[in-house]
Amino acid sequence: MGMSRWFAVRKQLRPRERLVLGVASFLLPLLVWSLVSYVPWIWHPQVEVTDSGAVSYFKPGMLVDREVFDKELLAAREAGAAEPEGVPANPIYLPAPHQVAQAFYTAFTTEPKRRSEQWLHESLWESIQVIFWGFFLSSLFGVPLGILAGTYDLMSRLSEPFIEFFRYLPAPAFGALAVAILGIHHAPKIAIIFIGTFFQQVLVIANTTRKLDPALLEAAQTLGARRLSLLFRVVIPGIITDLYKDMRILLGWAWTYLIVAELIGTSSGITWFITQQARYKNFDNVFAAIMMIGIIGLTTDLLLAWLGRRMFPWQQAAARA
Amino acid sequence: MPISIRRLFAPLLGLLLGGASALASAEPLKIGYSDWPGWVAWEVGIEKGWFKEAGVEVSFEWFDYVASMDAFAAGQLDAVTMTNGDALVTGATGAKSVMILINDYSNGNDMVVGAPGIGSIKDLKGKKVGVEVGFVSHLLLLDGLKQNGMSESDVELVNVPTNETPQVLASGDVSAIVAWQPNSGMALKLVPGSKKIFSSADQPGLIYDVLAVSPESLAARKDDWTKVAKVWYRIVDYIKDPKTYDDAVQIMAARVGIEPDEYKSFIDGTKILTLDEAKGFFNKGEGYTSLYGSSKISDDFNVANKVYDEAQDIDSYIDPSITGAL
């Protein structure tokens, strides 16, 4: 026992230990972030001026590099003038955890100031719908095509070489074309998510389909299964659990395209909030919004994982056996 | 805003049907606008419901500036807010427009910001300057150099997207950057000891901000555009009136998502024009005090910098009749 139990190869730890480690995986980055933010001698490359002293361009609240501050301090001291005062600070790009937490809260509670403006949760909901439709449309075509390509060599050769080529083309590059054809509202954004997801989706699913144990197919054929029933009664049930896992990963993939997608056409959704707040250097708001996306993504994934366990109980049994 | 399947496919359907309905008179005028004080001002009219009162259906769409010009070029908008120079660029590269209204000219919001130790344009000799080449900032820099008896060959240009100029100045890799608000202000804030060494206040009329309408829409619905222009001057009055100034600032600040007090400084760097002032700038003339003259200078600049190849027919880009008739 001892240490070696913790590093046993491909053996699961006890449920309680796994939970604690999972929580720690979040706490560790938070700890690093807190240390950098709150312990004055860790990093803090700048100084926040509290008293400008005799330095003409210093203003209280201004952030200056420590070297600049030290230089001016020295100059003031040598000249016998009033010395500037300040406290160590981090650059504006790195707000402290409590600032981000506060921004997170106020972002949701701030009332829309204009009639045409939306609450933040409405903007988020808009983004979620863009993701949903992009992913839904991609799956509508991508899943059947992937399964067919993984089953029949004809479909594979007819589609995959082109898809292999197309998947390297950056989805955002189609932005202007999407706007020209689909207008300025949601449609071009959905199209970008579609382009970003679809081609990977076909290849991933085709690959998963190919991994199906050939013995199953041979047995079914020996027992007289015809083409369609082979597809629907053997192939699809055989890959369904892996397919579901693929889809979870691909949904995460779709999320990563959200920001570029929403930059196209009218400014909308959570991206509008992020880019606008970044433009005015309100980075606490920016990080809060980025975290919202992370939280939504993780929650969705946990939900889907739970749903998967309910839908495919045999997979659990197989894993334990 | 829920997205229905029908709305999703409506554009596709429109495409299949030839998209012919775009100019039908019942459609609201589609206008793209973006984050510049002179254009954010439109928000006052939208918020107050003045377009409806004037009897014109409009649909203002909020964009990033470049995305708004792209959407206009793609034929998705009836009009877009741009600078006079960018109207020429957009026109020369495929989407012709006609400037019917001057919102403002930049009065200090566009600036050259020098790194600590750089006190004037003359100090830039032989140094690197971060600027988005071929855009209005570049034009401003050239003018600043010229006013100081220098030329482009006296400095080394580093091509930088305008919204990244604050970070570039902070990196210390350049001695100055050229940008408009809010980027210019952010650069000043971000780099202590940095200084404004030249700005559009030193050359008013270098950059006019306008409403540019597609020629088709202008021909088909001139009456509606006249109504839009009338609403604009109602907005201008509301902003200029000290009694309602604060309310106007509040609406504008809410549009861009910052505090009203912070936004006031951006409005100050923008000279929003009264009707009489605008009429004056619509008169033909040479130099910066005429929209024609200023556009001619932009045109020369664009051709010289190979933004496009052929000089544009300035007169065809300007229609003073709507403003003139108010």
Image: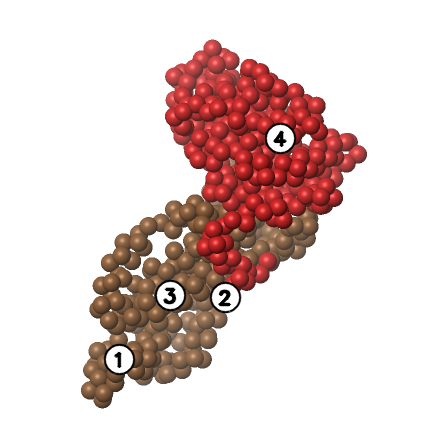
In which chain is the residue bearing label 1?
A: A
The answer to whether mark 2 and mark 3 are in CB contact below 8 A is no
- Please give the chain letter of the residue carrying mark 3: A
Colour representing chain A: brown
Asked whether the residues under marks 1 and 2 belong to the same chain, the reply is yes
The residue indicated by pointer 1 is A227
How far from the left and from the top, in percent, is residue B256?
61, 42
Image depth: mark 2 or mark 3 in front? 3
Of all chains, the one bearing label 2 is A
Indicate the amino acid at tag 1: Arg
Estimate how packed mark 3 is, as few (under 14), some (14 to 19) or many (20 or more) residues with alpha carbons within 10 Å. Answer: few
The residue under the point 26% across, 70% down is A150
CA distance for labels 4 and 3 = 48 Å
Tell which circle, 1 or 2, labels the residue nearer the N-terminal end: 1
Residue at 30 percent across and 82 percent down: it is A229
Say which mark, if any, is on residue A299: 2
Residue B174 lies in quadrant: top left
Q: Residue A46, position in %: x, y?
A: 51, 36
Residue type pointed to by label 3 = Phe
Residue sitting at 70 percent across and 23 percent down? Answer: B276
Residue picked out by circle 4: B101
Disc with the residue nearer the chain's start (3 vs 1): 3
Name the colour assigned to chain B in the rendering. Answer: red
In the rendered structure, the answer to whether residue A138 lies left or right of residue B218 reads: left
Q: Position of residue B39 (x, y in %)?
A: 61, 36
